[in-house]
Amino acid sequence: MTKHGFFRVAAGVPSVNVADCAGNAEAILELASRAAADGAEVIVMPEMSVTAYTCGDLFHNAMLAQGVGAAVDFLARGSEGLDIVLVAGAPVENCGRQYNCAVVIARGQVLAVVPKSYLPNYNEFYERRWWQPAGEGLSTVSIGSFRDVPFGCNQLIEINGVKVGIELCEDLWTAVPPSSRHALAGAEVMLNLSASDDVIGKYAYLRGLVAQQSARCMAAYVYAGAGYGESSTDLVFDGKAIVAENGRILREGERWRSEPQLVMADVDIDALRRDRLHTTTWGDTALREVSARYNIITVATGVKTDDGTLMRDINPLPFVPSSSDDMEERCNEITNIQAAGLARRLDVTHTRHLVVGISGGLDSTLALLIAVKAFDRLGLDRKGIVGVTMPGFGTTGRTYNNALTLMRALGITIREIPIADAVNLHFRDIGHDPAVTDVTYENSQARERTQILMDIANQVGGMVLGTGDLSELALGWATYNGDHMSMYGVNAGVPKTLVRHLVRYFVGITDSEEARTALVDIIDTPISPELTPAAADGTIAQRTEDLVGPYELHDFFLYYTLRYGFTPEKIRYLACRAFPGREVEIEKWIKVFFRRFFNQQFKRSCLPDGPKVGSVCLSPRGDWRMPSDASSALWLNGITD
């Protein structure tokens, strides 16, 4: 495992010949050597990979048994110079019974033999004809030239500090897979040696099963299935190879290949350990369910150094789905969560009016679209939504016109209240020079706008709908008791990188051509609070990302800070791989992120209510409780130069 907490795993699918133990062992060792050269710390081969799975009644033939022993000795000798743990499948006899087993080999030794717990004996399978299911307890077995090898299903292999559990094929398909017990006993990586034949629809089902079991176990799951070379008498094997981690498929092989293949991935042990630590019911379940004694076998391969490569995809926009189908589904789900939360709040308070400040920017646009969706759901007249545009010193014609166009197209009540005169009077009252465009200059406008919205809400007997998003809350990019305050913050759980996509989603489902035109231009408008005067040509001069940093970077930092609790060093490591060529930017803005995240907690400690929509949330009543005076020193010092 590297200093960044990654553990490299491999699933190998060798081309085999039925009953050719020597040839199969050579093919297995070749794949193991390739995996070791590429830095893998463990490799799993398919079920019965030493003999092939489809030997039939040859499994009880003495010559095949001799061939298995010689092949295991060959693999053990071949492993002496490899920095990897090899797990291959073979039939093993113990006390006059034969078992379908995983044989664990490393450093010239057979470390353990793990028998299959559940043997299918239905449809095309009749494993009970040859093998016995694993019994309870631990014993020892002889295999090849090795004696007193630990034998039993309750064994974990600890490789470089990472505990690995093993199950075989059908074990995964049972109601309580052995991997569930292994995980509760401490296993963080599961290996499955399989020989599951292919039939219509089976791969999709299996793929889901692997992903789901990795999620249920909060573990990595490495699956290697039999492939080319198995007998085609009655069945065909497609060579499945899958690596999953906590519900997500990281890598999968190409099925139906006649050549051997190797599927490798770096699984994030830090992330898995954090989720188990954070999920309190995990420890409770372990205490209740784990009663069997486990044998832990410790082995160290060569120290894995960071060569700069990472065998996993790092999404630069972790809040944003990568596929268009997932995007549409995600947007539909999020907007329904937002609208349902708002509708309930309106219903329970008997409120029929909402007041929303509309700037022509992304956040207020999304809030307005959600308000319309909630009103439509409740059967309320859209005129009950009071959209207020409040042009000030930095308002441009582009945002002003987009705000009016959108409100008009959506059929809500429109109010326009310029704030310049009121703010200038305030400046005179407090003795501020309006030529000094400092924080007082900016925040006075934000607070004036909030006062207007609150007072209009009193006029109409309604509530003020907040528009600020999750990213702004993380950075404290809001004026305290200004746009920071509302009666319900509908965007509080939505990060900035996702807001744009949600607005784009509404472009596709909105009937009004006028609304679509405005929405498209709003999406293309630079993000700005428009609190300082516009440029000479009337365009936006104050750009948020020039001041506080790129939201795509800040959202990346936010995700890995809250979702996994990673160190700044690891977050920077991941960011440099997600955003190649932007290392200098990352170095600058990650410090800004942690400084602001800690310093601005006081604003989050008194947030209005708002719906949680994803795995990351900053509500002080929900997911995030943090003292407002916590020090950021440890985190800032953790960002090494």
Image (cartoon, rainbow, N blue to C red):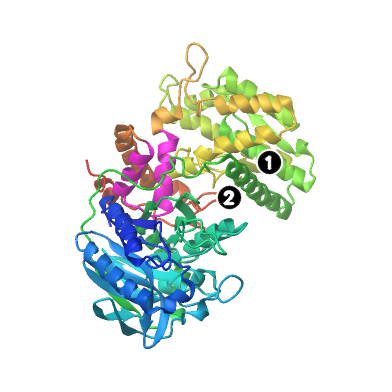
Tell me, yes or no, whether the highlighted magenta stretch contains residue 251: no
Residue drawn 25% across the image and 45% down it: 307
Q: Is residue 565 above or below residue 572?
A: below
Give percent across and percent down for residue 224.
43, 60
First in sequence, mark 2 or 1: give its number.
1
Name the quarter where the N terminus is drawn: bottom left
Badge 2 element: loop
Q: Which mark is residue 557?
A: none
Which quadrant holds residue 591? top left
Foreground residue, 549 or 166?
166
Which quadrant holds residue 100? bottom left
Badge 1 element: helix
Residue 87 is at least partly visible in this image = yes
Q: Residues within 10 Å of mark 2 (few under 14, many from 20)?
A: many
Give percent across and percent down for residue 61.
41, 78
Foreground residue, 79 or 420?
79
Circle 2 is placed at which residue position? Answer: 610
The answer to whether 182 appears left or right of 206 in the picture is left
The secondary structure that most of the magenta stretch takes on is helix
Give percent across and percent down for residue 634.
27, 51
Q: Identify the magenta region.
A: 550-579
Name the quarter where the C terminus is drawn: top left
**Residue type at the position of mark 2:** Gly
Q: Which mark is residue 371?
A: 1
Alpha-carbon span between mark 2 and mark 1: 13 Å
Q: Residues within 10 Å of mark 1 (few under 14, many from 20)?
A: many
Question: Residue at the top extreme?
Answer: 537
